[in-house]
Image (spheres, grey):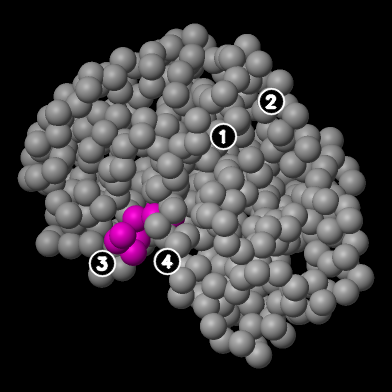
Amino acid sequence: MLLKRAVESRYRETVASRRVTVVTGPRQSGKTTLVRSQLAGTGTFRTLDDRGVLDAALADPAGFVTLGQRPLVIDEIQRGGESLVRAIKSAVDKDSGPGQFVLTGSSNFLTVPTISESLAGRAGFVEVWPFTQSEIAGTTGNFIDSVLDGTPALSEHRPSGLRRRDMLERVCAGGYPEVHQLPVPQRAAWFRDYVRTTIERDVVELSGIRKVPEMNQLLRLFAARTGCELVMQNIINDSSLERQAVYDHRAWLETIYLVCTLPSWSRNLTRRVKKRPKVFIADPGLASWLLGKTPDALENPTDPATGQLVETFVYAELRRQLSWATTEASLFHWQDRDGAEVDLVIEAGDGRIVGLEVKSGQTPRREWFRWLQLMRDTLGSQFIAGITLYGGDQVLPFGDRLLAVPISALWEL
């Protein structure tokens, strides 16, 4: 069954208003399925995964972009190289009408200079991530828009009573569409093949780097730190790679959407704010597989990976919701050198702030709100809410604009 994607409206708006629409996101996240479903008998679809189509694009880029009904969809555009992108630039410079080209690719176009520079001012970008829990459930709620409007929606929310075990199963499944079509015993093999083929196809093609085992080793080192502050020296110390190779490989793992970094946030709450980002594996199911964790293992209250993976799960949900939220917002974390920290910070374009703590426990505690209270008292009216997302099943108040909220509110609200 084809699930409706929440980003569909953002995609249609971009195609209707921009000369070029660039659809990016991880491999196997549903980009091609989304684009093909929106053609509805119009336009032309070509994939550069087809050897004959790729040869034609490389042999005559200008002719390749001239033929075909608009929009001309070019799938896996990164395989066409700089000459094809320049041909598209030339075509849209001659005709400024919207909806001419849709380009899809499994690497982050914003980090590929030949594409980002050539299409600057001409292209709109749409990110397609693996499924969110709301898409899997067939609902349309958006947690980010709701919480930035204030606490009433949260206070009135009636949770479904999601069991902790069910939440951990969702964490380990992640959001890749194909994973949800497979029996649980077959998912580990899928993740293994996914990592291998993604690195071999995208990194080797774009960079020429052929040391795939080194990339795999580095990916697992990042997985061990998912949800944690990224200290590159620690990664270098634990790897067998040269210092520069670690930095280079990290950049490629981010480019192909296996690893994400979350920047630090500062509004001068204290004078000793840390500026390092946090690191996350882009999908919690992939992170669970890399760490060898199952729902049974994560139910162990002493397993430190549980907290990391639950935070990765929450981060992934919010990162994906940003791609279609109606409120312009960004995601950060906050930490200072004296131990104060807030796991996730949502900042709206107009300065409104929501602070989020993530806890896997089922019983909320007053100390969970210590740093959210500091944030509230410092920011004043710009502080909309301080929320601890936890593994329980009740919405509970802990002071002015402070609430404990079940993690399931991410998709049930």
Left or right position of 326 against 149? right
Q: CA distance from mark 2 to mark 4?
A: 34 Å
| Residue 233: image location, x then y, percent | 67, 47
The secondary element bearing badge 4 is classed as helix
Q: Which residue bears the numbered disc 2? A: 190
Image vertical order of residue 26 relative to residue 136, above or below: below
Looking at the image, do the residues carrying marks 2 and 3 touch, with CB atoms under 8 Å apart?
no
Residue at far bottom of view: 94
User: Considering only order in the chain, which callout, 3 or 1, is on the residue closer to the N terminus?
Assistant: 1
Q: CA distance from mark 1 to mark 2?
A: 10 Å
Residue type at mark 1: give it. Answer: Tyr
Q: Which mark is residue 176?
A: 1
Image vertical order of residue 78 relative to residue 297, above or below: below
Magenta range is 322-329
Residue type at mark 4: give it. Answer: Glu
The secondary element bearing badge 1 is classed as loop
Residue type at mark 2: give it. Answer: Trp
